[in-house]
């Protein structure tokens, strides 16, 4: 596998709608940076958040997930309680080519504050808004800034196309919009 460069990302975004909306170049004027970089794309977090709270003594169960453990907020600044997490989504909608796998890493600005961003790989021919998981590993409240950079996507070219893509198997998160909770 090889890493795809900025000119490939630009071309795929413009010609194939791989990233919408697409920001050409890095934007960083007083914000956490976002846009296309040398070998990746720094995506923004939207202003929709599901913040974990245990007011109702909910149990986190991936097989029977209940949203009663979350409070919903639409805000420019999300405050995550100490040792807690929030779900959000990217501003950008992604359409992944069949010969590409995408991995994501959190921005160093957040990592240096004890805020971890987790995203599972974007599989070949998956599309949708990416659900982002922000974990506040600190004993203090932590802020996440909407419409600013949250994580970097790195596009990997496969040596050959897969036999079965995410679209072929009708994956359960295909075409997701908004913040998407676990599905079985």
Image (spheres, rainbow, N blue to C red):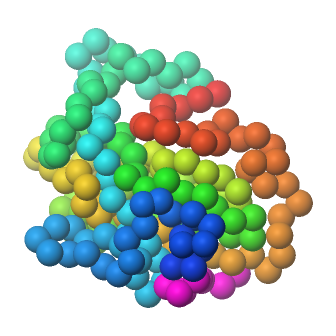
Q: Position of residue 45 (x, y in %)?
A: 32, 53
Q: Residue furthest top?
A: 56
Q: Is residue 50 above or below residue 140?
A: above
Question: Residue 96 occupies which quadrant of the picture?
Answer: bottom right
Q: Is residue 95 left or right of residue 112?
A: right
Res. 152 visible in picture: no
Question: Residue 68 occupies which quadrant of the picture?
Answer: top left
**Residue at 48%, 35% in the rendered image:** 180
Res. 179 visible in picture: yes
Q: Start and end of the magenta stretch?
A: 1-8
Choose between 132 and 56: the one closer to the eye: 132
- Quadrant into which the N terminus falls: bottom right
Q: Residue furthest front?
A: 15
Q: Residue furthest right?
A: 163
Q: Position of residue 85 (x, y in %)?
A: 30, 40
| 4 in the magenta segment | yes
Q: Position of residue 61 (x, y in %)?
A: 50, 24
**Residue at 74%, 50% in the rendered image:** 166
Choose between 168 and 83: the one closer to the eye: 168
């Amino acid at each position: 596998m090889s890493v795809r460069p900025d000119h490939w990302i630009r071309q795929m975004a413009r010609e194939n709608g791989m990233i919408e909306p697409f920001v050409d170049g890095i934007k960083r004027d007083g914000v956490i940076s976002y846009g296309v970089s040398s070998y990746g794309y720094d995506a923004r977090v939207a202003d929709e958040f599901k913040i974990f709270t245990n007011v109702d003594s909910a149990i986190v169960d991936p097989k029977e997930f209940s949203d009663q453990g979350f409070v919903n907020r639409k805000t420019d600044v999300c405050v995550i309680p100490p040792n807690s997490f929030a779900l959000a989504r990217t501003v950008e909608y992604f359409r992944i080519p069949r010969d590409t796998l995408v991995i994501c890493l959190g921005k160093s600005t957040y990592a240096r504050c004890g805020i971890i961003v987790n995203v599972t790989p974007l599989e070949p021919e998956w599309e949708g808004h990416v659900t982002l998981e922000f974990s506040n590993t600190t004993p203090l409240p932590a802020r996440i800034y909407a419409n600013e950079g949250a994580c970097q996507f790195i596009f990997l070219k496969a040596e050959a196309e897969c036999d079965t893509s995410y679209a072929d198997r009708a994956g359960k998160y295909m075409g997701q919009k908004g913040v998407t909770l676990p599905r079985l």
